[in-house]
Image (cartoon, rainbow, N blue to C red):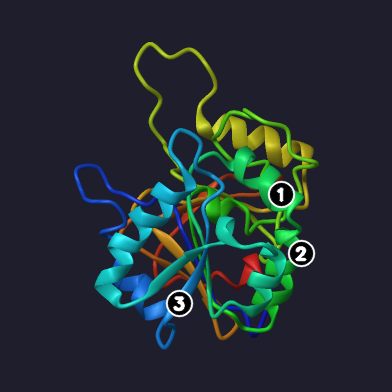
Amino acid sequence: MENMKLLLISNSTNAGEEYLKYPIANIAEHLKGVTEVLFVPYAAVTFSYDEYERKVQNRFNEIGIKVRSVHREKNPAKAVREAQAICVGGGNTFALTKKMQQQGLMTAILRKVKQGTPYVGWSAGSNVCCPTICTTNDMPIVEPESFKAIGAVKFQINPHYLDANPEGHAGETREQRIEEYIEANPRRYVVGLREGCMLRLMDGKLELIGSRPMRIFKRGKAAYEVNAGDDLSFLM
């Protein structure tokens, strides 16, 4: 993990703000020296990949980086191998995973990030950096080959982590669902990454960025909180 440069963002947009506005300064810092990113738009379901590429480009114009979407490439895995940096957008994690598996992108991206190529993901794009997509909040609207994902980190992320249980809602809370996961997968840590927060891995060091704490789940331990600046080496 020494070489890896990962920026894993919980959500693209904070309530009432413009798309990708709050994390753009962190993205710019993470992609310092990069002039073009290869973008994976496959989490888009209700709008086109072209639209998604345009939407991200509009924000990346502010930091002087060109966005090239992998859906335009004849050989997507080759495009990954040649990329200066890789960005994977949010949307439906199952749609994203299915298409990435079909194109051999999970393996290609893992090899590439191990060589030190910067990676930025938000929401579903953070989820697919984990060993599996089993801690997504999304509906399985399509069936991927498996739940296996890139596996660049050893822990699972639950993006958009919420403590709240809406009034009158009698179903499971997010915490209860994650507790089911760790019961079935006792060796795995799960991090509840709240909105407006992100994890950055750089020079072998993992750090939490954001003003809200992150919730840690592991079987046999009571769930607990960590804050920006805390030692997260146990997740490595």
Instruction: Say left or right for 154 vs 223.
Output: right
In the rendered image, residue 229, in percent from the top left (x then y), is placed at: 41, 73
Q: Which amino acid does label 3 sit on?
A: Glu
Query: Where does label 1 land, which residue?
Result: 132
- The mark nearer the N terminus, 2 or 1, is 2
Q: On residue 36, which mark appears?
A: 3
Residues at marks 3 and 2, CA–CA distance in whole angstroms = 21 Å
In the rendered image, residue 183, in percent from the top left (x then y), is placed at: 74, 37
Q: On residue 107, which mark appears?
A: 2
In the rendered image, residue 86, in percent from the top left (x then y), is placed at: 54, 69
Against 37, residue 192 (above or below) is above
- The mark nearer the N terminus, 3 or 2, is 3
Residues at marks 3 and 1, CA–CA distance in whole angstroms = 28 Å
- Which of label 3 and label 1 is nearer to you? 3
Q: What element carries label 2?
A: helix
Residues at marks 2 and 1, CA–CA distance in whole angstroms = 13 Å
Q: Quadrant of the C terminus?
A: bottom right
- The mark nearer the N terminus, 3 or 1, is 3
Instruction: Say left or right for 217 vs 211.
Output: right
Q: Disc count in the image?
A: 3
